[in-house]
Amino acid sequence: MILIATITGAVTLNYRKSLNEGRAFRTKEGIDRVETMLSLYFAEHPEANKNVSEYSELLNIATNSPLVKNAKDFLQDGWGSNYDISCKENGSDFEISVISQKYEQYKKEKEHKSTSK
């Protein structure tokens, strides 16, 4: 019984680790895709207001993009949380920021584990 419990525990830990690694990969790729979609949108629509941070505005842009199949899923990270997205125009500079709180937390935990070894 102890042996079975030990093996089950090890398998569960490895499964959770793999699941989180998959979510992190999906999130990293998702951030790149959201940034690309927004960059293309603003390049095609120079007249558009580039100071965007409201979810409804971002959802509208994603819904109308030919690059996006499901806008709601597109704007979510691997853990199912919405990205924190902001687009700001400051004079001639333009900045797109896409952040996942869960991904940032995952990176900190992973970094902490690697430095504590």
Image: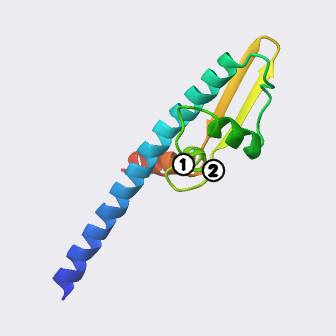
Which residue shows up at 55% across the image and 31% down it?
66
Of the 4 image quadrants, the one containing the N terminus is bottom left
Please determine whether, in this image, residue 66 is positioned above or below residue 44.
below
Assign a secondary structure to mark 1: loop
* Number of dots carrying numbers: 2
Horizontally, residue 66 falls left or right of residue 19, namely right
Horizontally, residue 104 falls left or right of residue 7, namely right
Query: How is the rendered protein coloured?
Result: rainbow
Amino acid type, callout 2:
Asn
**Place of residue 21 in the rendered image (x, y in percent of width and height, measured from the top left):** 38, 50
Which residue shows up at 71% across the image and 40% down it?
60
Q: Nearer the viewer, residue 108 or 45?
A: 45
Most extreme residue toward the top is 92
**Place of residue 78 in the rendered image (x, y in percent of width and height, measured from the top left):** 49, 51
Q: Residues within 10 Å of mark 1 (few under 14, many from 20)?
A: many
Residue of label 2: 82
Horizontally, residue 19 falls left or right of residue 9, namely right
Q: Residues within 10 Å of mark 2 (few under 14, many from 20)?
A: some
Q: Nearer the viewer, residue 114 or 36?
A: 36
Which residue shows up at 61% across the image and 22% down it?
40
Q: CA distance from mark 2 to mark 1?
A: 6 Å
**Place of residue 115 in the rendered image (x, y in percent of width and height, measured from the top left):** 42, 45
Please determine whether, in this image, residue 70 is positioned above or below residue 17.
above
- In primary-sequence order, the first of circles 2 and 1 is 1
Assign a secondary structure to mark 2: loop
Q: Nearer the viewer, residue 15 or 61?
A: 61
Residue of label 1: 77
Q: Which mark is residue 107?
A: none
**Place of residue 81 in the rendered image (x, y in percent of width and height, measured from the top left):** 60, 54
Please determine whether, in this image, residue 62 is positioned above or below residue 81.
above
Tell me whether circle 2 and circle 1 mark residues in contact (CB < 8 Å): yes
Horizontally, residue 85 falls left or right of residue 77, namely right
